[in-house]
Image: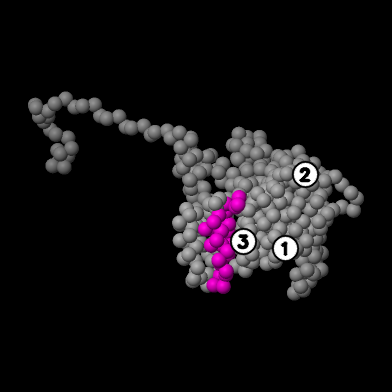
Amino acid sequence: MHFLSLLVPLRPSPRVEPCAPAAATPRPIDMPLEIIMTILQLVYYNDNLEIDIAMLKSCSLVCHAWSLTAQKLLFRDITLQSQRALESFVGAIDRSCQRGCALGDSVKRLRIIMDHNQPSGIHQHSFALTVSLCPNLTGLALSLYGCVAPGKDIVGAPDQLRMRRPAPLFDEQTIQLLTSGPEITALEFNNWSENEQTTTQLLRVWPTLKSLSISGTAPQLAATPSDPLPCALERLRLNFQTPPSNDYMRWLLDRSSETLRVLEFDREPSADLLEYLLNSHRSTLHSVSLPSVSSRDQASAIQKCSELRELRTERPSVLPLLYRKLPESLEHIAFGVDRDSVLHAVLEVVKNGTSLKTVAVHIWAGGESHNQLSKLKIGCAWRGVDLTITSNMRLFRLMTVSLPLCFLKT
C-alpha cells in the first residue's frame, strides 16, 4: 500500500497548482540528403585508401533515409569474378524497377575477371550485357585469362610454356552490345591469354577513351592495314614483358600527338620504345613514370620533355645525371632511396627548383638511415616543399598528382 500511495495520492493537496500540459514528444529531425551524402562520402575510403565496404554496409542499415544513399555508394565500384556474382548483380540493377535503375545509374567503375579456365567463369555475352546496363559507367577494368584442353596444361614448365592459354576473340554480338553501351573514358585491360588481337578489338569499341592501361600479352596489328585508333588519349600505362612494336604504338597514338599528358611504365621499357614515345610526345607530356632510369639515353630523352611537371621512379638505383638538367616546369618528383642512393643531384633540384611543390620518397632496405635524408627534410622545409616519406609501396604509388583519370578517383 505504501508503494501505491506514493504513485497515486489518496487526498490531493489543496495547495497543488493546476498541472501544466505534458511536453510534446520531440519529432525526429529530417536530415537533408546533402548532409547524408557528405557524411557517407567522408567514410567512403578507409585509412589504406581502400573503399570501406564494411562501413558503407553498416551505414545502409542506419535508417531508411540512409539505406539507398549508402547502397548507391556501394554500387559505385563493382568487382565481378564469377557468372553467379554477375547474375546477382544484374538482378540488383534490374531497370524495370526504380531502385534497380538507381543502383545501375550509380555504377561508375566496373572490374570484371573473365577466366576461361574456370567452370563458373563469366561468359563474354554476360560481360557485354552487364556493361550495357550501367549507363553512367566511365571506367572499365577487364582481366582476361585463356584456357587449355584438359590434360594439356604443362604443370611445372617455364611460365612462357605453362601460360600459353588461348582465349576466343569477342564475337559480333559481344562487340555490338559493348558498342551500344556507355561511352567509357578509362579502360584497363589485362590480357593474360595468348590472343594478340583482343586488345585491338576492345579499343575500337570506345573512341571516347582518354585513359588507357594495357598489360600482359603484347598486342599486334592485324595482317590487313587498318585506320589508326580514333581515341585522343591523355594517359597511357604499359606493362609488358615483351613490348609492342613501334608500328603498333604509332597506330595506337596517331590521334594523341597533341593530347597525351601522362606516360607510365610498370616494367622497364626497351630503349627503342622509350626513345620513340618520349621523342614523339616530348612537347605535351606532363608526367612520366618509370621503374628506374639507368642509361644516359633514357635520362637525355626525359630531359627533352619541355613541359614535364611530374617525374616518378621507384627503384633506388636511378642515374644521378637525370636530375641535373630537368625542365624548370617540374613540380613533383618521386623516387626510391636505399642506403647507397646518391642524393646530391636531388638536393640540388630541391634547392634550385623554382616550381617544385612536392617530393615523395619510398624507403627501401636501409634507406631510413641514409645520411642525406635529414638534409632532404631540411631543404624541403626551407623551400616550402611538401615532403612525404613512406615504406609502403602501395601508398607511394597512390601519391599521384597528375591527371585525375585513374580508377581511384571519381
Location of mark 3 (residue): 324
Q: Is residue 331 magenta?
A: yes
Whole-Å distance between the Cαs marked 2 and 3? 33 Å
Disc on the earlier residue, 2 or 3: 2
- Mark nearer the N terminus (1 vs 2): 2
The residue indicated by pointer 1 is 297
Residue 45 x, y percent position in the rendering: 52, 50
Q: Residue at x 78, y 68 (%)?
A: 160
Residue 118 in view here: no
Measuring from the top left, give residue 161's x and y in whole percent.
79, 69
Vertical relation: 159 (above or below) 204: below
Please state which amino acid type lies under the numbered disc 3: Arg
Residue 327, image x and y in percent?
Answer: 63, 53
Q: How far is disc 3 from disc 1 in space, using C-alphas?
A: 14 Å
> Does residue 355 lie above or below 135 as drawn?
below
Give the amino acid at mark 1. Asp
- In front: 31, or 316? 316
Of 205 and 238, the residue lying toward us: 238
Q: Residues within 10 Å of mark 1 (few under 14, many from 20)?
A: some
Q: Is the C-beta separation of discs 3 and 1 under 8 Å? A: no
- In this figure, which residue is indicated by the disc labeled 2? 255
Numbered label attached to residue 242: none
- What residue span does the magenta drawing correspond to? 328-353
The N terminus sits in image quarter: top left
Q: Secondary structure at mark 2?
A: loop
Query: In the rendered structure, are the residues bearing label 2 and label 3 in contact, judged by CB atoms less than 8 Å apart?
Result: no
Q: Quadrant of residue 352?
A: bottom right
| Residue 232 appears in view | yes
Secondary structure, mark 3, is: helix
